Amino acid sequence: MYSVERLVLGALATNCYLLWEDRHVLIIDPASRSERIHAAIAARDGIVDGIVLTHGHFDHIAGVDVIAEMFHCDVYVHERDALLLRDPHLNLSESQNITVQHDVKYLGVGQQSIGSFTFDVIDAPGHSEGSVMLRWHENLICGDVIFQGSIGRTDFYTSSNAHMTQTLRMVKTLDPDLRVYPGHGESTTIQQELLTNSFLR
């Protein structure tokens, strides 16, 4: 049995996702040090196979060091966003100085296996240079690439409007039945966004 569990965490109401394969769990974007992550995993006697980051902005990485230490697990990020993890200027947290000191492994584009999980990593630059989306079963965990009715901002360090345009062109070719789990807000589908999201027209 597999499932997606959402935890809304941090000051910016960031979606942290727990992907479940039976008792095994993959943590996506631990947005804060909240005990809710540990409690949700403990409630199902979960076995953590790793932490995956959709990109390196502070509101998606604030809990990484604590959670990685707690569960003794590896952390994965696209190589192009690795620098953001160590640089508060680039990850937009200069006032809070949020960084990741834990060693990281790089996500490759294409099929990736981590523990019990096999999924596709889709290169999706625009919001940040190293933004990725994860296609897992009929689910698309998309970080801040697209939201219900909107898209991620492209006016940050390492953002690119031109790259976002290319990424959105690619998104329009994806399976319309994919369930989309964004970094903020409610889930949606590719089909719904093609019909209602002006950025995908």
Image (cartoon, helix red, strand yellow):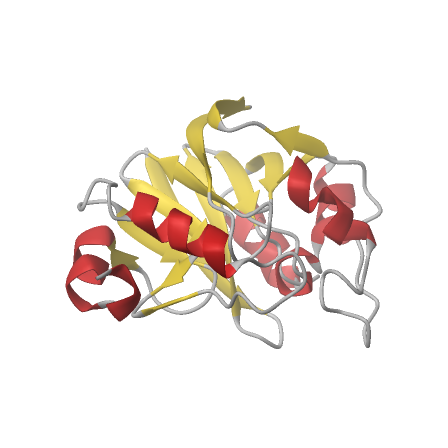
Q: Nearer the viewer, residue 162 or 132?
A: 162
In this rendering, does residue 116 appear at all? no
Q: In this image, 186 relative to 183: left or right?
A: left
Quadrant where the N terminus lies? top left
**Displayed quadrant of residue 197:** bottom left
Q: Nearer the viewer, residue 190 or 1?
A: 190
Q: In this image, 138 relative to 143: left or right?
A: left
* Relative image position of residue 100 (x, y in whole percent): 79, 51
**Displayed quadrant of residue 139:** top left
In this rendering, does residue 134 appear at all? yes
* Relative image position of residue 198 (x, y in whole percent): 25, 69
Residue lying at 29% horizontally and 70% vertically, measured from the top left? 149
Quadrant where the C terminus lies? bottom left
Q: In this image, 151 relative to 32: left or right?
A: left
* Relative image position of residue 127 (x, y in whole percent): 53, 58
Above or below, 115 against 126 in this view is: above
Above or below, 175 against 63 in this view is: above
Residue lying at 81% horizontally and 42% vertically, measured from the top left? 102
Residue lying at 58% horizontally and 47% vertically, measured from the top left? 42
Q: How many numbered circles are shown?
A: 0
* Relative image position of residue 24 (x, y in whole percent): 50, 32
The extreme front residue here reads 162
Above or below, 102 against 160 in this view is: above
Q: Nearer the viewer, residue 32 or 83?
A: 83
